[in-house]
Image (cartoon, helix red, strand yellow):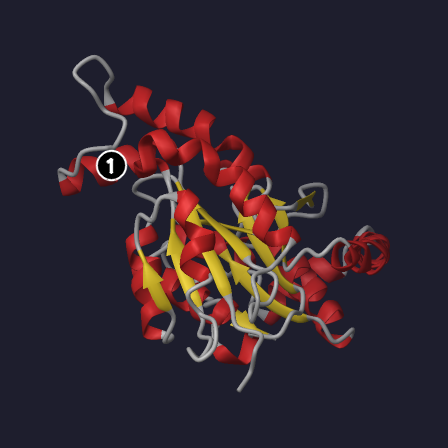
Amino acid sequence: MNPQKQLVILTGMSGSGKSMALNTFEDLDFYCIDNLPPNLILQTVDLWTPPREPQDVAIVADIRAGQFFDELNEICRSIRTNPPQHFARPVVLFLDASDSELIKRFKETRRKHPLVTAKRGISEAILLERKMLDDLKENADKIIDTTNLEPEHLRRLIRDFFGPENAQERLMIAVVSFGFKHGMPLDADLVFDVRFLANPFWVPRLKNLNGTHPDVAQYVLSDPLTEPLLEKLFDLTEFSIPQYIREGKAYLTIAIGCTGGKHRSVVIANELARFLSSANYVVRVEHRDLYQARGQTDARPTTI
């Protein structure tokens, strides 16, 4: 019997996909509880004491807790400092999405936002919820931005991060390429701008390819500025990642941005992911904005 089970506190913005995430945890054989009042979390987890066999647990606690919500941040802090018996250090997973996407989802589903009232519309409710969740998001172990995620992509992320093969306490690193014109990733811990590199977009034979194509990669890597950039990027991550591990961080998202997210950022993200993988880190690489373009190669997230 493995005493070190996973305990996940799932929270985040209303409409960000928490119900779908919880269903995925259930598929992973977690014991799942939705909308639990925060002050009952510790009592609930303490149910798994002998002779009951410990099991992985996922609990959704969010703004629906109403008058009990204010206790959530302190309780999350407490259980991470003193993990319950039989559980590894609990993980606070925060799901987020852009305001415009949240509004769109509520309009499509006709579900009522928990903070909407006769005097407060959907936009004001989302703004208020963001303010109320600010500290939780700041202290979350992992943030997933679901703005541009298809349902299966979210399910895949949950499986990648919390599946049985990843239950051990290791830092999991996501290297994400993106385009600044599509907005920065909401879940980024570190952001690097590579728009100063030569842009394949202005080369006719490369314009309609993307950074996963060998010709585009060769073009970007042949820029005289690329080698010193990679040297400094490798050096910085090599120095900083052990510090994140020492502080107990379980998930790290490194975002590499260029203008459209199709050429330069893709190449640099792939190079960084390969470097980190060679250093024996668990690395996922995701090219977020390849999905934005017609005729571009569909580059799915992978574990390297």
Task: Point out residue 267 in the picture as x, y percentages from the top left corner.
Answer: 64, 61
Task: Point out residue 109 in the picture as x, y percentages from the top left corner.
Answer: 15, 43
Task: Point out residue 298 in the picture as x, y percentages from the top left corner.
Answer: 42, 66
Task: Point out residue 301 in the picture as x, y percentages from the top left corner.
Answer: 49, 67
Residue 9 sits above or below residue 283 on the image? above
Q: In the orientation shown, which residue stands out farthest toward the top? A: 119
How many dots with numbers? 1
244 or 6: nearer the viewer:
6
Q: In the orientation shown, which residue stands out farthest toward the bottom? A: 1
Q: Which residue appears at 32% of the width and 32% of the height?
A: 66
Q: Which residue appears at 43% of the width and 55% of the height?
A: 43
Question: Mark 1 packing: few (<14 Cα in 10 Å), some, or many (20+)?
Answer: few
Residue assigned mark 1? 104
29 or 191: nearer the viewer:
29
6 or 281: nearer the viewer:
6
Q: Judge from the rendering whether residue 193 lies leftward or rightward of residue 35; answer left or right.
A: right
Q: What element carries label 1?
A: helix
Asked if residue 185 shows in the view, the reply is no
Q: Quadrant of the C terminus?
A: bottom right
Q: In the orientation shown, which residue stands out farthest toward the left? A: 110
Q: Judge from the rendering whether residue 141 lies leftward or rightward of residue 65; answer left or right.
A: right
Residue 142 sits above or below residue 135 on the image? below
Asked if residue 209 shows in the view, the reply is yes
Residue 169 sits above or below residue 232 on the image? below
Q: Which residue appears at 24% of the width and 36% of the height?
A: 104
The kind of residue tagged 1 is Lys
Corner quadrant of residue 28: bottom left
